[in-house]
Image: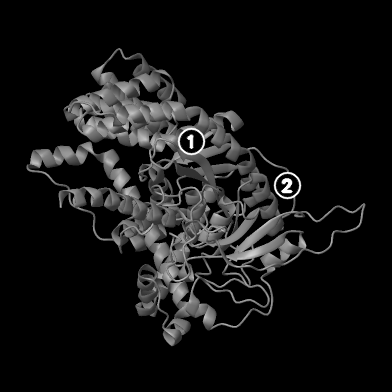
Amino acid sequence: MGNQLLAIVPLLGLSIAGVLLMIRKKRRAIPSDWGAISEKVELLPPPPPPPPAAPHPLTGLTFVIKDIFDVEGHVAGFGCPAWKASHAPATQTAPCVRELVEAGAQLVGKTHMDEMAYSIFGENKALGTPVNPVCPDHVPGGSSSGSAVAISADLADFALGTDTAGSIRIPAAFCGVLGYRPSHAAISAAGCVPMAPSLDTVGVFAADPAVLRHVGHILLRQPFTPPRRPLSLYLADDLFDLCSIPRRHVTEAVLSAAEHLFGPIVKYVQVGQDLLLRKVPAIQHFLNLLPPPAAPQGNSSTTDSSSSSSSSGRRAAEEGKRALQALAEAMKLLQRHEFRTAHLAWVQQVQPKLQADVQVRVQAAVDADPEELAIHAAQAQLVREQLRAAITDLCKGDGLIALPVTPDFPPKLRAKPQVLDEFRAAAMLLVAPGSMSGCPQVTVPIGRMECSPSGLPLAVGVMARHGADRFLLDSVTHFAPAVQDAYKAVLPKLSKSQAATSSPAPAAPVLSQAEAAKEKGNKAYKQKKYQEAVDHYTVAIRHDSKNATYYSNRAMAYLNLHNFEQVEADCTAALSLDKKNVKAMLRRGTAREMLGFYPEAFEDFSQALVLEPTNKTALEAVTRMRESGIA
């Protein structure tokens, strides 16, 4: 009997190994089109004109389109079998598709998408999920999933998609390609199944920034203007703080590329505080719809008072985040209202069976009170107008904004619903500024985070004011390769830093971790790496939020970055902890003077003189303000 068992065991082991190998091979089987193509459709360009006339501008290029666009003789499937079965073939081709063909490009197919364009992940259980060529075990992003995959897999030179709430920007980031969401209404959406018309845009994917620019210029049909050099690049500080992706992997590459190409043009902006709370009064309607913020915790009145006063910087960050949540709420309700208006009759008549996450959102639109939705939608349009004006003012004089596209790397395929819901909620905070303002934005791939298990893709968004599409595309043509080269240059240092951070070490008390972060901040500051210094001081504050020096030091770094609002907030926090912190007084006085708050600045400098009567900086500031008559 024992010999029989010994004989069976190796066979059993071989059988298990064989089964595991078969499963692995089956899982890795990838179709030749990466699951991107929903239908092979061909539209040939017109014959080239005879010499000496120039050839058509897009001659030799191929493209695919999301299955949301009309092509004569074909049904736009909208990612939904029930939709395709209940609609007749189109009688004419969408103008944007026709324009590209007439310009010399060849249409070679339609691409898969999320059901009814109502998801950002690209998983379609009814028609199949396109395979992400960059990381096959992760979602490709949606709803323009197939278009992003087709470009990432080199199936075409460019692709058309649509973006309502991130449906081009997110899959472009996940699949490592360029994705252009234009200014709202800059490219005709005629012949495209609507999702939410006041948010819908027709955009482009490409791997080559020159192709993206060329195709974008043709679709925009705007008069030629010479390329212009960006004069400012605002880093959306608070949006990067919301991301789980290591911030420095993106920001260091962006800062390096911007300085190399354009010089010292980088500034900082808090989208929540500087734009929404200060310049978009209509956001209050949606702030009122949010649950009230959690009350501060504490065991005694002294602790409560100290905690409240010492966290003004943190409080400002929380208020800014709530403003972003309110903006996302405005976008959600506007989208729901317009989706309901466009598709309620069809949904009620056909009652389609949709996958669970899409079904929840469609049902919420069907069940919503139309009168309440109309009120919210009207307020959302006010938010839209005010936010667009605020961004136009910020970016006047050829400015750009750099912002994150997604809060984290692409989720795994078949992730738990709770994981996807949390990711979606976080992503909406990042895509809402672009969607609600209607401003143009390009997703720019940076590279792969080599220290992550699969070498997952990194990307950054670049935004311009509404209508500045040509300027944006021209700028990205140079910025995209520069930021990729910059990332390759900084990657060894970042990987080393990541490895050092993640290497096992003896447990240390929280205070020593804070001090270590402060020392790193001091070192970075001495090397004039001010943003790196800010990052280290922020880590110190997270470990010990009751140390005035950490806030004051971070204010010192922010001062060199010309982020005067944050300087004032950090110095106020420092002074609430240490009322005799002269350095914080001087830094806050400087920031207030730069912001035009002259009486408050004079008061700070004067108080510093009371504490240190021989302080040269304070004495010079008080004298200067008195002589200029602004004190």
Quarter assignment of residue 362: bottom left
Identity of the residue drawn at 30% across and 59% down: 416
Residue 129: give x, y in percent of width and height. 46, 62
Q: Say what amino acid the circle numbered 2 marks.
A: Thr
For label 2, count other residues whose C-alpha is less than 10 Å away and answer few (under 14), some (14-19) or many (20+). Answer: few
**First along the sequence among labels 1 and 2:** 2
Identity of the residue drawn at 59% across and 71% down: 192
560 or 438, nearer to the observer: 438
Q: Secondary structure at mark 2?
A: loop
484 vs 581, left or right, is: right
In this orientation, does residue 631 appear?
Answer: no
83 vs 213, left or right, is: left
Q: Where residue 301 is drawn, which disc sits there?
A: none
For label 1, count other residues whose C-alpha is less than 10 Å away and answer few (under 14), some (14-19) or many (20+). Answer: some
Q: How is the image coloured?
A: one colour
Q: Secondary structure at mark 1?
A: strand
Quarter of the image where the C terminus is located: top left
Label 1: which residue? 267
Against 231, residue 322 (above or below) is below
292 or 597, nearer to the observer: 292
Residue 236: give x, y in percent of width and height. 44, 43
Residue 231: give x, y in percent of width and height. 59, 36
Residue 53: give x, y in percent of width and height. 89, 54
155 or 174, nearer to the observer: 155
Label 2: which residue? 225
What is the residue that sits farthest to the top in this orientation? 614
Q: Say what amino acid the circle numbered 1 marks.
A: Lys
